[in-house]
Image: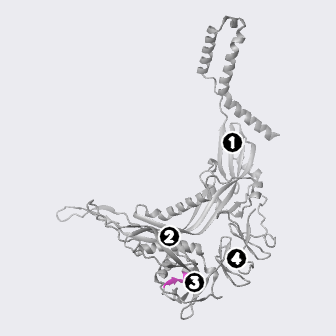
C-alpha cells in the first residue's frame, strides 16, 4: 500500500523520521526537531491499510456461503477521536448513612433484642488521580458495530495524516456532528464520571478536576466496504483494513412482488360497472375500447405503485451489474 | 499538507533538539533554557533554591504566584447521622468568603512519580502550606536534569486549582464547594534541593520525604 505521508524537513528538505503517534519529527540530517501542527489541539493520524483490494474481496466472499458477485469495493477511512489524560481531582463529601438491624444473642432467659445501628456519615476530603483514555467514533454509522474499531485504532501504529494523500487512497469520512469542542466536553464528562464513580451516593458531594498531560488525537482507521449480490439479493460487507476481520455483514433479500390486492380489483370492477351504467349512449356507440381506456390507465397507475419498488430495485441492480461488467 | 513547525530557540534562533516527552530543553548554542508547549517554545524562568549544604538531588517545582478569589462559594454543613427527626435542624455552615484563606502562591511538583497522590499531590500541598516568606534563590546552572520535568506550566496551573480547592476544604470543617477566579502571574521553575536519607530523599527546607523508588 502506498504511503501517503512523506514528510520532509522544512529546514533542509531531508526525509523526516516520525515515531508512531508522535507529535514531533526528527531530521536525521540536520538534527532539527520539528513539531507537527495540531488543528484545534487535535493531532491527526491515520493507520496504514494492510489489506489489499483483492484480499478484501476474498474476505468479503467468505462472509456468505452463496455465490457472491462483487459490484464495488471501496476503502473508507473512519475517524476516531481519542483523548488521553491524567485526571487529578479533589473530592469532598459525606459517606452515606446506612441503618442496620442487628439481633442480639439470646440472654439467660432465651430472649433476643433487635438493635438498630447507623453507620457512615464520615466526612471524606481527598485527592484522587488516575490515567484514562477516552475514545469515540467520529461518525454515526450503523455498519461500524459496537466499537471494535475504537479499541484497535488506539493500538495500531499511527502515521501523521496528510489529507490530500489520504483521499487518494480512499474515501475519507470527515467527523460529523461531534466537533472538537463537543469531544472535549464529552471527554471531560467521561473523566469526571470515572473519578467520581466510587463515590455515588455520597452526601454533599463536591469535586474539582484538572486534566494533565492531555494527548488529543483524531485517527483515521481503514476499512473496506464491499458491495455485491448473491442469488438472494444484495450483500454488503465491511472488512477491517488492518487485520482483515469482519466488522459487519448486511444482506438484503429481493422484495417479493405483491399481487394486486382484492380491494384494488374490486375498486376497478366497481368503477367499470358504474361507468357502464352512467356512460352516455353516444360513447357506448364508439365501442368498448374507448370506454375501457381511462380505466386501464388508472389500473396501470395503481398497479404500478404496487410493483414500483420491485421494478425499480431490479432495474437499479441490473444497471449496476451492467456498469460493473462493462 | 501536514503543517511542520521547526522548533527554534526564542533567543538565538538555533535549532532545538527535543525528544517526544520532553517538557524542558536547552539550546545547545546559547544555553538558554526553554519550555515546550505543543508547537510553541517559551523562555523558561528558573532558579535554584539555595540552602546550607550541598544537595544530592534537585527536583523541579513550579512556583505559581496567583491572586485567587472565590467567584462562587457554598459551604455545606456536615449532617449528623442521628438526624432522623425533622425537628432537628441541620447546623448552618460557618465558612464564608471572608474567612476563606487562599495562599498567594502555590508550589507544584513538576517531576514524575510512580505514586502521584503521595509524592506529587501531597508533597505540593505540604510545601505550599509551609511556604512562608521568600526562599533564597540563585541562578540555575548546568547541574540540573531537564528531563526530570514531566509537567509543564499549564498542567501546573490545573494542579494548583485542585490544590487550592483542597486547601479551602482543609481549612474548613464544612464541605466547601467553590468556583475560583484566579489571576496567574509569571510562573517560575524552582530546582528544589533534596538530600539522601536512607531509602528516601529528604527536602532540605521543610523535611518532606520522598521515596527514592517513587521517582522511577
| Residue at position x 80%, y 75% in the image | A29
Alpha carbon distance from label 4 to label 2:
35 Å
Check chain identity for marks 4 and 2: say if they share one: yes
Check chain identity for marks 2 and 3: say if they share one: yes
Residue beneath disc 1:
A235
Segment tinted magenta in the rendering? B208-213
Q: Which mark is residue B181?
A: 2
Q: Quadrant of residue A28?
A: bottom right
Labels 2 and 3: the sequence-earlier one: 2
Q: Position of residue B175 (x, y in %)?
A: 39, 69
Residue beneath disc 4:
B18
Check chain identity for marks 1 and 2: say if they share one: no
Would residue B58 appear left or right of A55 to someone viewing this image? left
| Residue at position x 72%, y 7% in the image | A286
Labels 4 and 2: the sequence-earlier one: 4
Residue beneath disc 3:
B190
Relative to A169, residue A159 above or below:
below
Q: Position of residue A224 (x, y in %)?
A: 71, 51
Q: Secondary structure at mark 2?
A: strand
| Residue at position x 73%, y 35% in the image | A316
Asked whether B211 falls inside the magenta stretch, the response is: yes
Please indicate, yes or no, whether residue B43 appears anywhere in the rendered image.
yes
> Farthest residue in the left direction?
A109
Amino acid at each position: 500500500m502506498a504511503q501517503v505521508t512523506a514528510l520532509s524537513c522544512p529546514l533542509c528538505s531531508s526525509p523526516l523520521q516520525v515515531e508512531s503517534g508522535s507529535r514531533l519529527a526528527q531530521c536525521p540530517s540536520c538534527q532539527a526537531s520539528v513539531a507537527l501542527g495540531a488543528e484545534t489541539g487535535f493531532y491527526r493520524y491515520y493507520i496504514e491499510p494492510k489489506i489489499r483490494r483483492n484480499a478484501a474481496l476474498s474476505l468479503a466472499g467468505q462472509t456468505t456461503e452463496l455465490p457472491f458477485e462483487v459490484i464495488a469495493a471501496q476503502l473508507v477511512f473512519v475517524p476516531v477521536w481519542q483523548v488521553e489524560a491524567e485526571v487529578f481531582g479533589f473530592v469532598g463529601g459525606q459517606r452515606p448513612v446506612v441503618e442496620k438491624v442487628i439481633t442480639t444473642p439470646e440472654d439467660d432467659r432465651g430472649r433476643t433484642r433487635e438493635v438498630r445501628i447507623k453507620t457512615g456519615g464520615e466526612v471524606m476530603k481527598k485527592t484522587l488521580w488516575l490515567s484514562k483514555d477516552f475514545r469515540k467514533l467520529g461518525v454515526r454509522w450503523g455498519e461500524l458495530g459496537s466499537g471494535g474499531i475504537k479499541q484497535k485504532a488506539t493500538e495500531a501504529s499511527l502515521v501523521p495524516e496528510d489529507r490530500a494523500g489520504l483521499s487518494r487512497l480512499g474515501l475519507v469520512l470527515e467527523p460529523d456532528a461531534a466537533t472538537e469542542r463537543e469531544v472535549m466536553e464529552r471527554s471531560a464528562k467521561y473523566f469526571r464520571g470515572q473519578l467520581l464513580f466510587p463515590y455515588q451516593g455520597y452526601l454533599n458531594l463536591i469535586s474539582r478536576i484538572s486534566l494533565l498531560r492531555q494527548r488529543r488525537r483524531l485517527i483515521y482507521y481503514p476499512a473496506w466496504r464491499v458491495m455485491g449480490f448473491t442469488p438472494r439479493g444484495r450483500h454488503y460487507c465491511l472488512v477491517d483494513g488492518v487485520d482483515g476481520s469482519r466488522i459487519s455483514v448486511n444482506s438484503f433479500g429481493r422484495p417479493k412482488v405483491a399481487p394486486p390486492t382484492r380491494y384494488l380489483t374490486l375498486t376497478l370492477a366497481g368503477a367499470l360497472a358504474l361507468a357502464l351504467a352512467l356512460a352516455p349512449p353516444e360513447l357506448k356507440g364508439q365501442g368498448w375500447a374507448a370506454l375501457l381506456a381511462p380505466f386501464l390507465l388508472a389500473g396501470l397507475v395503481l398497479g404500478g405503485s404496487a410493483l414500483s419498488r420491485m421494478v425499480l430495485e431490479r432495474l437499479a441492480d441490473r444497471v449496476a451489474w451492467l456498469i460493473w461488467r462493462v | 499538507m501536514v503543517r511542520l513547525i521547526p522548533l527554534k530557540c526564542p533567543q538565538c534562533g538555533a535549532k532545538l533538539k527535543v525528544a517526544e516527552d520532553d517538557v524542558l530543553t536547552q539550546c545547545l548554542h546559547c544555553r538558554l533554557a526553554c519550555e515546550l508547549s505543543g508547537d510553541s517554545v517559551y523562555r523558561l524562568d528558573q532558579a535554584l533554591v539555595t540552602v546550607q549544604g550541598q544537595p544530592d538531588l534537585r527536583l523541579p517545582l513550579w512556583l505559581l504566584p496567583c491572586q485567587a478569589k472565590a467567584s462562587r462559594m457554598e459551604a455545606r454543613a456536615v449532617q449528623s447521622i442521628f438526624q432522623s427527626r425533622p425537628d432537628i435542624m441541620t447546623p448552618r455552615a460557618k465558612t464564608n468568603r471572608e474567612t476563606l484563606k487562599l495562599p498567594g502562591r502555590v508550589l507544584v511538583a513538576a517531576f514524575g512519580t510512580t505514586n502521584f497522590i503521595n509524592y506529587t499531590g501531597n508533597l505540593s500541598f505540604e510545601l505550599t502550606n509551609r511556604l512562608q516568606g521568600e526562599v533564597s534563590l540563585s541562578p540555575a546552572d548546568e547541574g540540573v536534569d531537564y528531563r526530570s520535568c514531566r509537567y509543564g506550566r499549564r498542567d501546573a496551573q490545573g494542579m494548583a486549582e485542585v490544590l487550592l480547592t483542597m486547601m479551602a476544604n482543609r481549612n474548613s470543617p464544612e464541605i466547601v464547594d467553590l468556583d475560583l477566579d484566579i489571576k496567574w502571574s509569571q510562573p517560575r521553575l524552582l530546582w528544589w534541593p533534596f538530600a539522601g536519607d536512607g531509602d528516601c530523599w529528604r527536602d532540605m527546607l521543610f523535611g518532606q520525604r520522598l521515596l527514592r523508588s517513587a521517582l522511577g
